[in-house]
Image: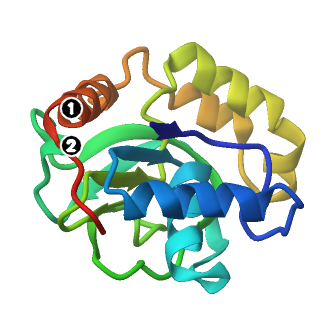
Amino acid sequence: MVLTGSAHSITSDYPWLPPLEDFTRARCQRGLPLFGVCYGHQLIARALAGRDAVGRAAVPEIGFGPVEIVQPHPVFDGLPNPFLVMSSHYDEVTRLPDGFEVLARSRHCAVQAMAHRRAPIVGVQFHAEFDAPAARRSVADEREKLVGLGLDPDALLAGIPDRRAGAEAILRNVAALAGKEGPRRC
């Protein structure tokens, strides 16, 4: 199961969020494979460690940038270190749930990736699913917001490579892990 990104902030309390947290906790407790991307990554942390495990990012990350692997994990097989991915987030994981470890970080985000030590549960802050056209649309759609944050949308657009530089490998690795990992409880 993949929990994807969202236009909503994980720091807000929406009426639909408690049932989603319950669903996420139940899936984790059953030890079923789970991959969280951006909001999904943050949701895993919030569902398992509480509302204060997530917060607003001190520095939002928008655009392509390097991510450093700090703990080897099969999700990163075949990737250089650092590798280049698209980020688009204003919130982040601020405290890991019990049983999790940090896998990767970036200049402004200490928890770019996390995984449970036993269960097949991985979360990534960056957007492995974004190709160049999706990244360009994301930056273009956020132009006014980015300018308001003091960021240069044109420079961000110019920094988008034509190729995702490793993101494809992450998606293949997640699919392979989900296919061979059996349930392991958190």
Around disc 1, counting alpha carbons within 10 Å, would you say few (fewer than 14), some (14 to 19), or many (20 or more)?
some
Report x, y in % for residue 54: 61, 75
Q: Which residue is mark 1?
A: 173
Report x, y in % for residue 16: 83, 55
The Cα atoms of the two marked residues, 2 and 1, are separated by: 5 Å
- Up-down relation of residue 91 to residue 152 (above or below): below
Which residue is at a point 51% across and 69% down the rendered structure image?
Answer: 45
**What number of labels is visible?**
2
Quarter placement of the N terminus: top left
Which residue is at a point 37% across and 57% down the rendered structure image?
Answer: 30
Residue 61 visible to the viewer = no
- Up-down relation of residue 178 to residue 133 (above or below): below
Q: Which residue is mark 2?
A: 75
* Labels 2 and 1 touching (C-beta < 8 A): yes
- The part of the image, by quadrant, that contains residue 165 is top left
Around disc 2, counting alpha carbons within 10 Å, would you say few (fewer than 14), some (14 to 19), or many (20 or more)?
many
Residue 19 visible to the viewer = yes
Report x, y in % for residue 152: 71, 44
| Towards the viewer: 50 or 8 | 50
